[in-house]
Amino acid sequence: MNTQQIIKWLKEQDSHKLDQLWQQADRSRYEHVGNQVHLRGLIEISNHCSRQCQYCGIQAGNRSLQRYRMTMDEILTCALQAQELGYGTVVLQAGEDFGLTTEWITKLIYKIKTKTALAITLSLGERNDSELRKWQQAGADRYLLRFETSDSELFHRIHPGHANKISDRFAILETLNQLGYETGSGVMIGIPGQTYDSLANDLLQFQKINLDMIGVGPFIPHPASPLGKQHANLNEKNNPDPNQVPNTELMTYKVVALTRLLCPQTNIPSTTALASLNQNNGRELGLQRGANVVMPNLTPLQYRKLYEIYPAKACLQEKPDDFHKHLINRITELGRTIGLGRGDSPHFKAKKKDNVTRFTLRRKTPTPKIMQRQVRRD
C-alpha cells in the first residue's frame, strides 16, 4: 500500500467501502494474530512529568494538578491483582518522571518478576541507553514509546524544548529493538496541523521501524493545555481546513484498520482514548476493525483520576474486578476468546527467531583467518 492509497482510505466517507476496509482488517487480524484478545493490566505509577507537551493534562506547566507517585508496595499489589485476574502482562506507565530513578525501577522490575509470572511493559518516556539496558537485564520485556508524528515541524510545535529531537525517539526505538525488547510505538490522530500526507507517512513509518506493538488514538486535548485552548478556538470558528486530519472516532478506526493491513503480525490495542470517544462500544468496534489487545486500568481509584492526560477518560470510577467481568462478557459476545499467557506478537516471535538463527549461523561460519589457513593447507 503506497501513500496515495492510504490517503484515499483516510478520506473515504462511503460507508459501504469502509465496511470492506473493516472486513479486510478483521480478516487480516484473524489470519495473523488469531482470535484471542490479550489483556494488559495498566498501572499509572506517577503523574509527575518534566515535559511541556502542549496537549497533555499532566505536563509540567499544569500547576493546579495534584501530583503523586505510587509506592513500590502499591504497584506490586496491582501487579498481583493482574495475575489473579488472569492477565499475562502488566504495563507500568508514567509521565517523564526522572524521580523514578534507574535503580528504583530496576528494583521494582525485579520484585514483580520474583512475585509473578507476568511480562512487564514499560512506558516511561525517553530514557537513555544505559537505563534501557539495565531494565531489560532486570527482566523488563517490552517498551512503549510513541513517536506521535513523523513530521518534525509538527513534533517541535507540540513539544517545545525538543528542538532537533524528532530523531531521538526513532533512535530510542532502534535501541529498544537492538536490546531485544518487544518494541511498541504509535501516533496521535488529528493533532492541529496534521495533514493527510503526514498521517500517511506515519503509517508507513510503522513498517520501516520494525515495530511489534502499535497503539494509535485520537488527539484529545486537555482543556488546561495550550493546544486544548487552541482547539476550542478552532471549533468556535467552524471553518475547518480541508487538509487537517480530524480527531474523530471514525478516523481512528480507519487508522487502526490500515495499521493492521500494513503491519499484520503486530499487537494493536483498542485504546482507552477510543473508548473515551464512544463509551458505549468504541473499544468493541476497535476490536472488530483490526485490534487484538485491551488494557484494563488497575491504577488505584484515588490516583486514577489524577492521571488526567486528557479529559473524560473512560473507566475512571470502575473497580478492576467489576470492569474485568464486564469486559470478559463484551469480548465473548464478539465471538472472541481471552488470550492466555504473555501474548507476545507474532512479529516479535519471528524477529526473535530470526535473530537466533543469524547468531547461530555466525557462530558456525569460519572466520576469515581460519578460512585462509584452510586454503593454505589445501
Image (cartoon, grey):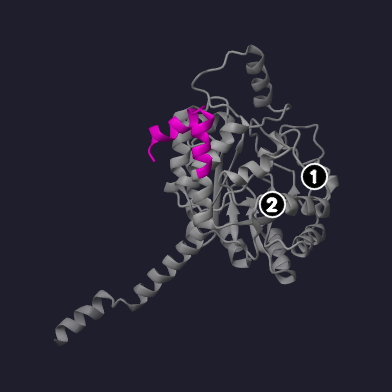
Q: How many marks?
A: 2
Looking at the image, residue 41 sits to the left or right of residue 286; the answer is: right
Residue 144 tag number: none
**Relative to residue 15, is residue 40 depicted above or below?**
below
Q: CA distance from mark 1 to mark 2?
A: 24 Å
Q: Nearer the viewer, residue 371 or 293?
A: 293
Looking at the image, residue 111 sits to the left or right of residue 369; the answer is: right
Residue 304 tag number: 1
Residue on which disc 2 sits: 331
Q: Amino acid at mark 2?
A: Ile
Confirm whether the magenta stretch covers residue 362.
no
Using the rendered image of the protein, determine whether residue 62 is visible from the camera's viewpoint: yes
Q: Quadrant of the C terminus?
A: bottom left
Q: Amino acid at mark 1?
A: Arg
Q: Secondary structure at mark 1?
A: helix
Q: Main secondary structure of the magenta part?
A: helix
> x, y (%) of residue 187?
55, 39
Stretch in magenta: 1-23
